[in-house]
Image (cartoon, rainbow, N blue to C red):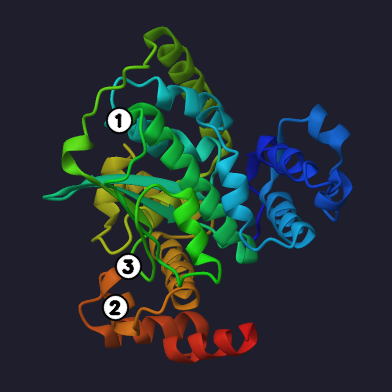
Amino acid sequence: MTLQKRVPNCYIQIAIRALGHENISSERILEGTGLTTESLAAGIHTNTEQLVRVINNSRAASNNPAIGLLLGHQLHPSTHGSVGWAAINNPTLTGAIEIFQRYSHLRTPFMLYRPMVSSKHYIIRLVMTENLGTAQTPFIEAMLLLLQHVIEFILGRPVKEGELYINSKPPAYAKLYADFFSCPVHFNAEHLELRLPLELQNTTNPSADEAMYQLALEQCREMAINLQRKNNISTEVHDYISSHIGQAVTLDKISQDMNVSSRTLIRQLKKQETSLQVIKDDVYAFQSANYLRRSSLSVNAISAIFGYQDSANFRRSFKRWFKKSPQQYRDEYLKQAS
């Protein structure tokens, strides 16, 4: 997948500022991106390829594999612009997370937020829709810390009673997580998510400012409308399926949720030379390969996550996508990584 989505350049500027304290030059951080401090000051957005390069440059220049934790610690909710301001001025915790669910694509278009409720927990699940390669772990760490900052801003205290689940193996520096995250962290999980006690769901926000909230919300709506004009229907369907992995996603269901008729959706996808099945295959291929690379879950467990009742059907699908079995794919990746 070509990385070409736009992201605000404030994240890059934060990296430059943070590493400047360690006497690492902006030129070293921006190496190979085609960016300069002048172009960053003159523009508002960069693209995902440039962000990935900056993350990798920052890790190499600082010789710090835990660069994601360092940079994430620098992120204030306001770093997320109007999305962050709308979240921290929302009257409730649930409302704040719903702002991220609806508008986070304006800031980080490759990460989706999916809140849900179980019998005991309020769950905030995060879904990556693109593979950022070696920059993925640092990016996820930074976004998890930003999420923690938002929640703790509303609670007015550390969220010690939460539990963070990460769907990848623990990194070599995993012990450092305890210095940055307020709650226990579990690796090799089925999903990337933060679980909070259910009673925190409707926590009121004592710092909420109604006027600021309405202003920020209006800015989010305006940006979303402008972005919608530029997006195509296949992108919307791609993101929808990504946030509903393992569920029975049908044409009728997608059409209903996107407020368009099934016939119109089929016609618009056909104009873009694609179909629901092609997009679903693309999403499932990407996400399943990601699980095989980043976690120790068995192939049977991964097939269950993707809604396959019979793991043999998952194996057949995977072989159709990659011309090799899931185990062969994992073995080859581990051999290359070692």
Return the residue at label 3. 190
On screen, residue 102 above or below 128: above
Task: Specify the label residue 220 is tagged with.
Answer: none
On screen, residue 173 above or below 88: below
- Furthest-top residue in view? 211
Is residue 319 something that shows in the picture? yes
Return the residue at label 2. 301
Instruction: Kindly indicate whether the residue at mark 3 contacts the one at mark 2 (C-beta within 8 angstroms).
Output: yes
Return the residue at label 1. 93
| Left or right side of 202 for 140 | right
Q: Residue 191: horizontal and vertical position, in percent?
A: 34, 62
SS class, disc 3: loop
Q: Residues within 10 Å of mark 3 (few under 14, many from 20)?
A: some
The one of 122 and 251 positioned closer to us in this rendering:
122
| Residue in the picture at 62% in, 66% down | 133
Name which residue type carries label 2: Ala
On screen, residue 104 above or below 225: below
| Residue in the picture at 35% in, 32% down | 157
